[in-house]
Amino acid sequence: MHCPGDWIAYYSPRTALKDGEPVRAFTAIGRVKAGDVYQVEQASNFMSYRRNVAFLTSARPADIAPLLETLSFTCGKGRHWGMAFRRSVLDSPAAIVP
């Protein structure tokens, strides 16, 4: 679970879930705000947990290709680097935030 002050970055593999165009970039970055975790109804019978985030409005998409050998969860994975992103949350020990 993310704590207030943690940085988070969103990775977007495609523009849409199944048949979207490839994006393969980090598309948003923000810092977790103080406050309680809360639930939001995403679909009938499905409630997800959320925490408020202050997103950087000046952020631009960052292509993942130049980072593949640097990030701990993709380094050395060869063609299968994308498998790491099938989990919902990945920790990165490296300082990759502004």
Image: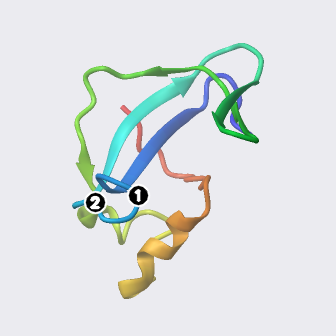
Residue 7 at x, y percent in the picture: 53, 33
- Residue 75 visible in the shown view: no
In the rendered view, does 60 fall on the left or right side of 69?
A: left
Where in the figure is residue 62, as x and y percent of width and height? 25, 48
Point out the residue furthest to the top here.
35
Amino acid type at image mark 2: Gly
Q: Quadrant of residue 9?
A: top left
Quadrant holding the C terminus: top left
Residue at the image point whose x is 59% and y is 55% from the top:
90
Given residues 61 and 94, the one toward you in this image is: 61
Q: Quadrant of residue 27?
A: top left
Q: Nearer the viewer, residue 17 or 7?
A: 17
Q: Which residue is mark 2?
A: 20
Asked if residue 25 is positioned above or below residue 61 in the image, the reply reads below
* Residue 16 location, quadrant: bottom left
Is residue 5 rendered to the left or right of residue 73?
right
Q: Amino acid at mark 1?
A: Leu
Could you tell me which secondary element the residue under label 1 belongs to?
A: loop
Would you name the residue on which mark 1 appears? 17
